[in-house]
Image: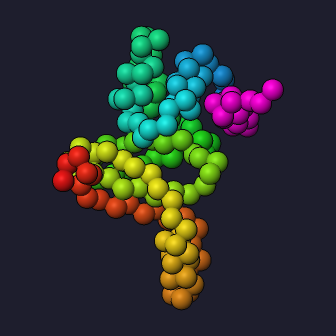
Amino acid sequence: MTKSKSSLKMEELNQCLASRGLKSTQQRYYIADTFFKTSTHLSLDELLKKVKRKTPRIGYATVYRTMKLLTECGLALERQFGDGQTRFENVLEEGHHDHIICLKCSKIVEFQNQKIEKLQEETALKLGFKVVRHKLELYGYCSDCS
């Protein structure tokens, strides 16, 4: 029987907690599981709303600390898309991807383009850089808003 992506990520979280000497709490696990089962870019407020549907007593600070931990463990990425909100996304097994963001409705679409990746590598090489990470964000208006 194959394990789900969420359960594999929960195992990684367990390893990270153990390596840091941190306790595993039911609230922490519920927040992490809710996040791992989400495929969108969530703000803390959006995640808190999802979590509160099942566990109303979880507070903002607990969600914040859990997401900080997931980010430090390499299980979540913190993103800023120019609207003043910090959002979090799952680290994908498929690897790097970029984003295109609508300035009107804030729709975020992920995309991968090997030509763009190759061009970035070639440019860095020409300029004598060794790239360790990068992000590409395109801003404009989606078909619904233009």
Q: Is residue 34 visible in this depiction of the protein?
A: yes
Q: Position of residue 133 (x, y in %)?
A: 54, 64
Q: Position of residue 24 (x, y in %)?
A: 66, 22
The verdict on residue 94 being magenta is: no
The verdict on residue 17 being magenta is: yes
Quadrant location, the N terminus: top right
Q: Going by the image, does 95 lie left or right of 108? A: right
Q: Position of residue 28 (x, y in %)?
A: 56, 23
Q: Main secondary structure of the magenta part?
A: helix
Q: Going by the image, does 144 lie left or right of 64? A: left
Q: Which residues are magenta?
A: 1-19
Number of callouts: 0
Q: Residue at x 51, y 78 (%)?
A: 119
Q: Residue at x 57, y 38 (%)?
A: 70
Q: Is residue 124 visible in this depiction of the protein?
A: no
Q: Going by the image, does 90 lie left or right of 137? A: right
Q: Going by the image, does 17 lie left or right of 83? A: right
Q: Residue furthest front?
A: 143
Q: Quadrant of residue 26?
A: top right
Comparing 57 with 34, the one in front is 34
Is residue 124 positioned above or below 93 on the image? below
Q: Residue at x 51, y 59 (%)?
A: 112
Q: Position of residue 100 (x, y in %)?
A: 36, 56
Q: Quadrant of residue 140?
A: bottom left
Colour setup of the view = rainbow
Q: Residue furthest right?
A: 1
Q: Residue at x 42, y 13 (%)?
A: 53
